[in-house]
Image: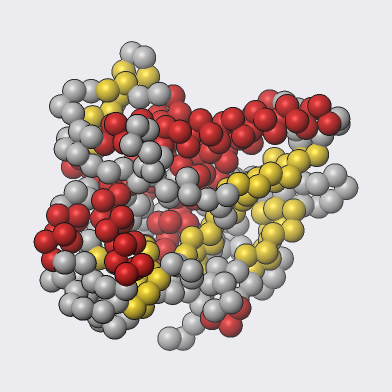
């Protein structure tokens, strides 16, 4: 998945800890194996090759595909895993600090469109999928969350009642450390930028995910392809790696979102979606009560009414232990 995972757990014995950890890492590896777009022979890459036939997918890829369908629907298209080809082109442009050529840009954005390109249906043996045309599927905004949730399920199955798993910034726990009220989590969505805004949480059970472009952005030289610059965007803006599949444009930064939820899958996908939705999320009907506004560029759920997104979240699972940053007037 192009990131690192770190696990902390408490067990009754060393053998229990070793067996539980091995089971957790096995689930991470299994989810990564089917969903990665880094390996040509992964199941996701094979599915993305395109075929008029319906293909039965593995149970693990089915988890990722169902979560992606749910994310696309609930975010009104802000979350779209069909951006793989476009994302690859854009990341190369950021590394080279140069706008892509118009023909390459047009070809890449033409391959974007979850609803037009990906179909899912329930078959007799499980989920079936059909991709209408060659499409590079990028599950970077959801597969980590799925892997974290599956790993925690493996820990619980081995009798672990206290563990914290960090999957590249997607944090989730199955219970607090022994004798403690919760895991103390500190989040700096913008790194050292923007005055070093820091949020501190007490995580009991549930998940926290952060998405942002603090370390992945650049100002580009050259001429931007036609239609890329919208509203206040201009060619000299600093752009991050985040792309808006609804408008087919890159987004200027810095941008970040911090989301708490009942599962890492949900936190992961909403953190990604909220970075794209930006200021419109606070006033939209995309997800009622999801966010209470843009505060210094950070979205996070309202702590007064519903502390986390999702219908099943245990309300005592995550608490914000520092005051929110002041609302930006810019």
Q: Position of residue 140 (x, y in %)?
A: 42, 48
Is residue 89 at least partly visible in the picture? yes
* Residue at the image point whose x is 85% and y is 44% from the top: 178
Q: Position of residue 288 (x, y in %)?
A: 43, 56
Toward which corner of the image does residue 284 lie, by quadrant? bottom left
**Lateral position of residue 45 relative to residue 273, left or right:** left
Question: Where 239 sits versus 211, above or below?
Answer: below
* Residue at the image point whose x is 38% and y is 38% from the top: 39
Q: Position of residue 269 (x, y in %)?
A: 45, 50
**Lateral position of residue 141 relative to residue 91, left or right:** right
Residue lying farthest to the top in this orientation:
124
Toward which corner of the image does residue 157 lie, by quadrant? top right
**Lateral position of residue 176 relative to residue 197, left or right:** right
Task: Please state, as top left, top right, bottom left or bottom right, where the C terminus lies in the image.
Answer: bottom left
* Residue at the image point whose x is 35% and y is 32% from the top: 41
Compare residues 166 and 14 and report the one nearer the observer: 14
* Residue at the image point whose x is 48% and y is 70% from the top: 214
Residue lying farthest to the bottom in this orientation:
330
Compare residues 219 and 284 and report the one nearer the observer: 219
Q: Position of residue 185 (x, y in %)?
A: 69, 59
Compare residues 69 and 236 and report the one nearer the observer: 236
Q: How is the protein colored in the picture?
A: secondary structure
Question: Where 317 sits versus 305, above or below?
Answer: above
Question: Where 22 sits versus 233, above or below?
Answer: above
Is residue 245 at least partly visible in the picture? no
- The number of callouts visible is 0
Toward which corner of the image does residue 220 lie, by quadrant? bottom left
């Amino acid at each position: 998945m192009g990131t690192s995972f770190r696990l902390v757990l408490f067990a009754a014995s060393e053998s229990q800890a070793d067996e539980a950890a091995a089971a957790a890492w096995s689930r991470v590896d299994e989810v990564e194996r089917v969903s990665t777009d880094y390996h040509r022979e992964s199941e996701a890459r094979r599915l993305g090759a395109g075929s008029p036939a319906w293909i039965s997918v593995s149970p693990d890829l089915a988890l990722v595909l169902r979560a992606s369908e749910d994310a696309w629907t609930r975010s009104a298209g802000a979350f779209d895993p069909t951006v793989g080809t476009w994302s690859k082109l854009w990341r190369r442009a950021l590394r080279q600090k140069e706008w892509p050529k118009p023909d390459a840009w047009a070809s890449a954005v033409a391959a974007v469109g979850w609803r037009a390109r990906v179909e899912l249906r329930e078959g007799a043996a499980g989920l079936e999928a059909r991709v209408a045309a060659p499409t590079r599927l990028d599950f970077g905004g959801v597969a980590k969350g799925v892997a974290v949730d599956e790993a925690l399920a493996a820990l619980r199955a081995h009798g672990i009642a206290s563990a914290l798993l960090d999957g590249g910034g997607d944090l989730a726990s199955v219970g607090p450390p022994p004798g403690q009220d919760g895991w103390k989590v500190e989040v700096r969505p913008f790194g050292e930028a923007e005055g070093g805004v820091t949020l501190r949480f007490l995580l009991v059970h549930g998940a926290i995910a952060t998405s942002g472009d603090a370390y992945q952005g650049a100002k580009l030289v050259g001429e931007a392809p036609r239609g890329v610059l919208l509203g206040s965007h201009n060619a000299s803006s600093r752009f991050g790696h985040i792309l808006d599949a609804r408008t087919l444009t890159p987004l200027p930064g810095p941008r970040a979102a911090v989301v708490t939820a009942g599962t890492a899958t949900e936190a992961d996908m909403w953190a990604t979606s909220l970075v794209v939705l930006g200021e419109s999320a606070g006033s939209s009907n995309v997800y009622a009560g999801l966010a209470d506004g843009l505060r210094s560029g950070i979205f996070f759920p309202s702590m007064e009414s519903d502390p986390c997104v999702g219908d099943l979240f245990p309300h005592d699972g995550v608490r914000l232990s520092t005051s929110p940053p002041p609302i930006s007037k810019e």
